[in-house]
Amino acid sequence: MREDKLRKKLQEQSLDGLIITALSNIEWLTGFTGSHGIVLLLRSGLTYFLTDFRYQEQSQEEVTTCKVIITNQSLFDEINTVGIQLTGKIGFQSENLSFEMFEQLSQKLSECTLLPVKDFCCEYVSVKCDAEIDLIQKATDITAKVFDKILGIIRPEITEKELAAEISYWNKRFGADKDSFSPIVSSGARSALPHARPTDCKIGNQTVLLIDMGCRYNGYCSDQTRTLFLGTPDNEFRSVYEIILQAHLMGISGAKAGIYGKDLDSISRNHISSKGYGEHFGHGLGHGVGLQIHEHPRINTKSQDMLTKNMVITIEPGIYLPGKFGVRIEDAIVVTESGGVSLAKTNKRLITL
Amino acid sequence: MREDKLRKKLQEQSLDGLIITALSNIEWLTGFTGSHGIVLLLRSGLTYFLTDFRYQEQSQEEVTTCKVIITNQSLFDEINTVGIQLTGKIGFQSENLSFEMFEQLSQKLSECTLLPVKDFCCEYVSVKCDAEIDLIQKATDITAKVFDKILGIIRPEITEKELAAEISYWNKRFGADKDSFSPIVSSGARSALPHARPTDCKIGNQTVLLIDMGCRYNGYCSDQTRTLFLGTPDNEFRSVYEIILQAHLMGISGAKAGIYGKDLDSISRNHISSKGYGEHFGHGLGHGVGLQIHEHPRINTKSQDMLTKNMVITIEPGIYLPGKFGVRIEDAIVVTESGGVSLAKTNKRLITL
């Protein structure tokens, strides 16, 4: 059925075939979870999946809807030997093919006209079916369980890196495939760096602690951020926390089918700006999440992506005060006709330890 | 000094500049460890490093030898505004630039002739200085410590995934930045899959256990494989283990400066073939290791890469008997004039538990 959608789009765009090189799209289409393969989807005819001998057993188990071709050569060397003469207009994923691979492909498929297509699969991949939402829910439930677990581990003497190690460990112990990204654990002024990496610094006392974490379950990602306080927060922190919490909730309510990414972004951003912190919210409000931790649609100040029902996106406003602290609250949510439905089971009220 | 090497090569190839998009090359050249940036290196003149606002503080700390430019736009939008008029022949890394980015760059740099260069930095990156070898040694020492730790954890009831979680956990607890790749833990017949992923299966009794693991220390990777046996191995396993151990040791001895990758590969491969297992060694003998877990040079049946002093490579012969078991032994080694010097401190004799 997913193949049918792509074939329909090929027809609309007068393309005879599509070469898929983005691994997450290949997984979405075929179920293949390995790290090396390409798909050749013909408008009229078969879908071929090419991979190397390392994935022979795995592809036989996972890939049931395409003709699987195993090769010891470069995948592009094999593409001409699938048993059909490729001609006509073939689309390729311009954002997922290196210039070098493009040149190789041009040589191999000299009878074809290769046409760059961008984000070809996005509109389909970004809208999740029930089974996919279930998997993101399961990943998010593991994240809630891990978060509860580490609440019991946090103490002033633990380092950011040690806490990050605990998160990764409990992700796997509670059934995840692996982390969906390296956990961000940042305390004190480091929490003001949106992409801080955990350090050997102890978390300490009387400090902010920002934790951004997620895992994969059957390939699907969770993504969640909470900001805690060890000790007694002052009024400035409490105030910023409240602004972010409101911006976060407004973002969730606003995530209705039909809204554009930039308009959803501005719902939360306007609130933050109205409180005087606009310049300290330096990233977009969110992003799609699924087989990739960051995927279509984008929710930022420029995004023309329109949200539709059953997209799964993050809502993650933040305020970052350099040298002081940062606050971010993030959930993965499902877009519906009447607003977003959060998948998270972790409390959002300020947790003080 | 690294810049000087690249400038010399630019001169030799009559190029006026180079756009570096491979993050590991950027880290090698500038020290930047973030996930978004490009370098513009001009033959006569400055080196520019462009990144986005998320990495403002980090790039100021890490990047000291180039002019750092922070942008809120696409990096390629900014490349024309570095304050100089770019003209002439500019090389770009064809294997590390998507077709789409190439098209964008072509538009932005319409006054330049863009020329694809492949593996431009490899010959320099693959030869390690003493400080780099020290870092790979430190990563390898952590791996030895983690391996010893998990020897005490292995028992028939533990699952492959649980053991993999322990490896990742202790990597970080013993000081690594993170895993250099997801650990491979495979027992029984799954050990015959060279790239098996850990499952929820218990390791069990009277079984082979293959563990391929590594970590990063200050960016540099370790990579090590050992194959153990829980219980009393039969003669076939003992015999295959001995063949692989000999092939591994012969590969290390043979890793002398001046040898070609394919000739080194054949030293180990011929031994395995002479014992009748040639068809069950389906991958190359090894690969370079450094800031990337897999990098130049390649050691396989076709490789024309010539080894030189102070390259760091893996030697990892394997025999995989489908439905039965697999054996692989792998060390990272330093190439010298008189053969390879292993960095590993983990025993290679068969460990039975």
Image (spheres, coloured by chain):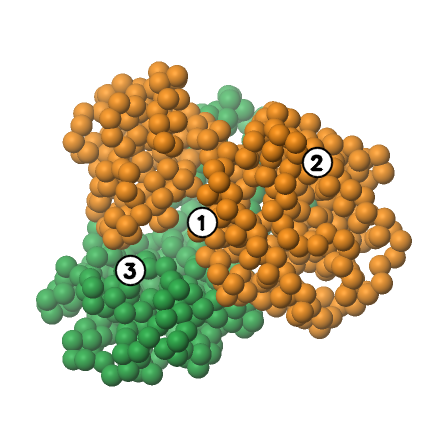
Chain colours: A green, B orange
Instruction: Give the foreground label among 3 and 1.
Output: 1
Q: Is residue A212 left or right of residue B59?
A: right
Residue B183 image point, x, y percent:
59, 56
The one nearer the camera, B65 or A339, is B65
Residue A88 image point, x, y percent:
48, 26
Query: Do the numbered discs 2 and 3 sit on residues whose CB atoms are within 8 Å?
Result: no
Could you tell me the amino acid type at mark 2? Answer: Ser
Residue under pointer 1: B219
Could you tell me the amino acid type at mark 1? Answer: Gly
Dividing the picture into quadrants, the one containing residue B32 is top left
Using the rendered image, report if marks 3 and 1 lie on a common chain: no
Chain bearing tag 3 is: A
Residue under pointer 2: B253
Which residue is found at the position 28% from the left and 42% from the top? Answer: B64
**Marks 2 and 1, the one that precedes in the sequence:** 1
The one nearer the camera, A120 or B210, is B210
Q: Is residue B52 above or below residue B120?
A: below
The one nearer the camera, A46 or A80, is A80
Which residue is found at the position 60% from the left and 54% from the top? Answer: B213
Residue B269 image point, x, y percent:
75, 35
Q: CA distance from mark 3 to mark 1?
A: 21 Å
Task: Identify the secondary structure beneath mark 1.
Answer: loop
How busy is the neighbourhood of tag 2: few (under 14 within 10 Å), some, or many (20 plus)? some
Could you tell me the amino acid type at mark 3? Answer: Pro
- Determine which of the numbered discs, if any, sits on residue A194 in the image: 3
Task: Identify the secondary structure beneath mark 3.
Answer: loop
Dividing the picture into quadrants, the one containing residue A97 is top left
Which residue is found at the position 62% from the left and 66% from the top? Answer: B149
How busy is the neighbourhood of tag 1: few (under 14 within 10 Å), some, or many (20 plus)? many
Instruction: Give the foreground label among 2 and 1.
Output: 2
The N terminus of chain B lies in quadrant: top left
